[in-house]
Amino acid sequence: MSALTLELRTNPDQRIDLSPLTPSALAGMKSKDIEAIAVGTAHPTLTVGDVFKLKGADAAKLRFAGTSATCDFIGQGLTEGEIVVDGDAGAYLGSKMRAGKIIVSGSAGPLAGASMRGGRIDIARNAGEKAGGIAVGEAHGMRGGRLSIGGRAGALLGEKMRRGLIIGRGGADDYVGARMIAGTILLKGRIGRWPGYGLRRGSLILDKEPKDLLPTFGDCGTLDFTWLRLLDRELKATGGRFRVGYRARRLMGDMAVLGKGEMLILA
Amino acid sequence: MAKLKIKGVEIIDTFAEAFPMVGTRIIITAPTQKWALIAAQTMTGFATSVIACGAEAGIERLVRAEETLDGRPGMAVLLFTMDVNKLQTQLRNRVGQCVLTSPGSACYAGLEGEKKLKLGASLRFFGDGWQMSKVIGGRRFWRIPAMDGEFVCEQTTGLTKKAVGGGNLLVLGRSHRAVLAACERAVKAISEVPDVITPFPGGIVRSGSKVGSKYKGQIASTNDVYCPTLKAAVNTALPANVEAVMEIVIDGLSAPAIAAAMRAGVFAIAKGGAGEGITHITAGNYGGNLGPHHFHLKEIVA
């Protein structure tokens, strides 16, 4: 059975909410019923049939094609299965998801992976602000799983994150890991001002020293870290495409708050 | 019935009587194989018999750098006790005093299993609030700051309640030298068998014991029927020409592992043949009423 594919007909003139379209919600549904699901956010109410052309039937592997930045909430609260997005995704991609996998060939809007608890999101290009951050109504940011961003991430990446791993290959804007409680953010490339602002615990692993460092980070020198070897091996085994090695300069902070976090600048 | 002989060494038709134990495995890594070995040897020191050591422990095998979680050389260690609480206490104390303290060490789970023993979960408190937890690949590790960097220790390790302690072989020979050489061969052969250890010094016990004593409060005493110097005084189990007896005690994570180890041991002992001075291979039991596991030598070598 081929993957259930939803191809965008034309870009709708309103934002659309695709949160009802998850593999578990669509399992066993007829195309006619799927086409009747409301996805609009304004009048007149748009349905799946108005916006998408349906092909295939296997909802366990759901595919969106030709999507744009107005397609919000793709894979929100995902609990199983796989969603492939051939195109861009709007806001809240995979927010609050618990398991499963989302793969985006383009870019994602703000709050990708916000308050996610598990599973994996791979965004080939850029992510908007607050990726891995706090979804509306949630107390914490990302709480588990893995968020990979091939391009650049917006500001406040991993805001108030508690657990999990974020990998960014194209740098990020200001306030990376702001108010982070725990977890790991791995970043290559140019990053904006004040990374680790309000960092309580958790690790920001950077390939080079950021230009604008908060004065509330203290230098512990360059050291060997056994746990980086564990991370390196895990990345290698799971296609993380990021060499960590085992040696890094450790800056502790943010001393303005708890100060038990770290910025590891890879040696 | 014809006597069973391997290369002229008589295999006595008897059985080893063994007991259920609880066991676990951990993997210790270090910057070099030498330091992984030192940590593992220290942790498994004074762990020959639960009678007075609290636990029975030993090095199961060397773990190559490519096989370990952190890519550094390591050692696999097995630890056994009679119940889960004692195993937990022994694991915490031994890892805390002997592995945590060893330069550059790290410590990981070596056994899966639904039941878990705390590892880093209790040792993390050494970090005095500076410890950090990291979940990598679904497993939780603790980073505990130490004077040479960080001690990395997995949160838990698995345990098995199907472990077996007290698998054994008794080796009888015409000279001390011959018996020692044969037992050394056997211990080496057994070390190649997975899931088992030989907890006594160099894997060999020279002071096999019997239950009880003439002295009040002495729970075990010398196995006089196997002592060559007492042949004339007791109901000896030894032929006149036997000068020495040594025992190999085996603990394993499962009964089949013990059987495989005993088999490897028997063939390694008999390898030199009767001409080398080994006369008999037998096994220790208490009549079969105490331990539920019976390893019959006849079946082991079949």
Image (cartoon, coloured by chain):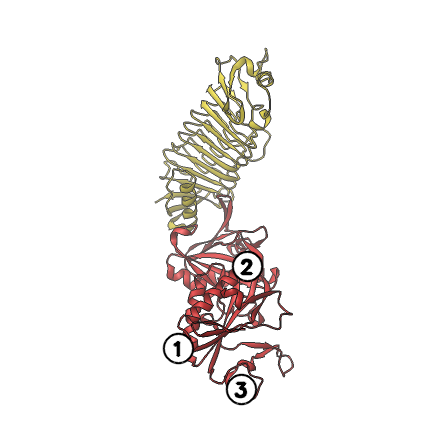
Chain at numbered mark 1? B
Mark nearer the N terminus (3 vs 1): 3
Specify whether A243 is left or right of B122.
left
B218 or B183, which lies in front?
B183
The image quarter containing residue B295 is: bottom right
Q: Where does label 2 land, which residue? A: B254
> What hue does chain A carry in this figure?
yellow
The image quarter containing residue B190 is: bottom left
| Depicted B106 relative to depicted B279: above or below | above
Asked whether the residues under the numbered discs 2 and 1 touch, taking CB atoms below 8 Å apart as contact, a structural biologist would say: no
Q: Which element carries disc 1, helix, strand or loop?
A: helix
Chain at numbered mark 3? B
Looking at the rendered image, the quarter that the N terminus of chain B falls into is bottom right
What amino acid does circle 3 point to? Leu
- The mark closer to the camera, 3 or 1, is 1
- Disc 3 crowd, CA 10 A, few/some/many (<14, 14-19, 20+): few
Residue A194 shows in the view: no
The red one among the chains is: B
Residue A52 shows in the view: yes
